[in-house]
């Protein structure tokens, strides 16, 4: 007697199965996750936690937020094809590295980096406003 399986067969996602913004956000999220883990491990190994706010921003605005926005675009593909989605991806992915790099520089004793923290924060914020509007349009 043959065994009955209730598990669906595993399938690979087709290359075009996800909107490009979802793929980009999910890919970037994975990079930020690894960067945040590496920073956390480095801080733990050294016992120096001066960059803990950088680690937090990398994990929350990088890994978590990019992953959630990528998954949202995968579930709501109509939101992913809007100009607002393009603005979101551009602003978030430009603002975040500017912000965390400047934040690390500021915590490392470079007060001149402070305006760049603000610039990166404003860009990332603007991107997330565009995301919220893109999603709201299709709900």
Image: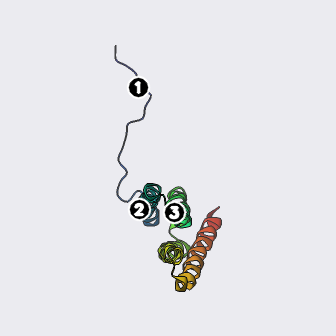
| First in residue order: circle 1 vs circle 3 | 1
Within 10 Å of disc 2 (Cα), the crowding (few <14, some 14-19, many 20+) is: some
Residue located at (60% from left, 74% from top): 125
Which one is closest to the eye, mark 1 or mark 3?
A: 3
Query: Height in image: 132 above or below 44?
Result: below
Image quadrant occupied by the C terminus: bottom right
Q: Which residue is nearer to you in this view: 2 or 97?
A: 97
Q: Position of residue 41 (x, y in %)?
A: 43, 55
Residue at the outermost front position: 47
Residue located at (46% from left, 64% from top): 25
The residue that disc 1 covers is 5
Query: Height in image: 70 above or below 11?
Result: below
Q: Secondary structure at mark 2?
A: helix
- 3D distance between C-alphas at marks 3 and 2: 13 Å
The residue that disc 2 covers is 31
Which one is closest to the eye, mark 1 or mark 2?
A: 2
Residue located at (54% from left, 63% from top): 52
Q: Which residue is nearer to you in this view: 61 or 109?
A: 109
- 3D distance between C-alphas at marks 1 and 3: 44 Å
| First in residue order: circle 1 vs circle 2 | 1
Q: Quadrant of residue 84?
A: bottom right
Which one is closest to the eye, mark 3 or mark 2?
A: 3
Image quadrant occupied by the N terminus: top left
Q: Position of residue 99 (x, y in %)?
A: 52, 75
Residue located at (43% from left, 64% from top): 28
Q: Which residue is nearer to you in this view: 2 or 95?
A: 95
The residue that disc 3 covers is 55
């Amino acid at each position: 007697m043959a065994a009955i399986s209730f598990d669906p067969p595993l399938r690979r996602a087709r290359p075009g199965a996800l909107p490009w913004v979802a793929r980009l956000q999910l890919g970037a999220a994975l990079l930020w996750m690894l960067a945040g883990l590496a920073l956390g491990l480095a801080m733990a190994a050294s016992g120096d936690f001066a960059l803990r706010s950088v680690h937090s921003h990398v994990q929350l605005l990088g890994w978590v937020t990019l992953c959630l926005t990528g998954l949202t675009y995968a579930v709501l593909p109509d939101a992913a094809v809007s100009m607002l989605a393009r603005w979101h991806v551009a602003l978030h992915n430009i603002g975040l590295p500017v912000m965390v790099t400047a934040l690390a520089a500021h915590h490392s004793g470079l007060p001149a980096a402070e305006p760049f923290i603000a610039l990166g924060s404003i860009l990332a914020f603007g991107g997330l406003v565009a995301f919220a509007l893109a999603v709201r349009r299709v709900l």
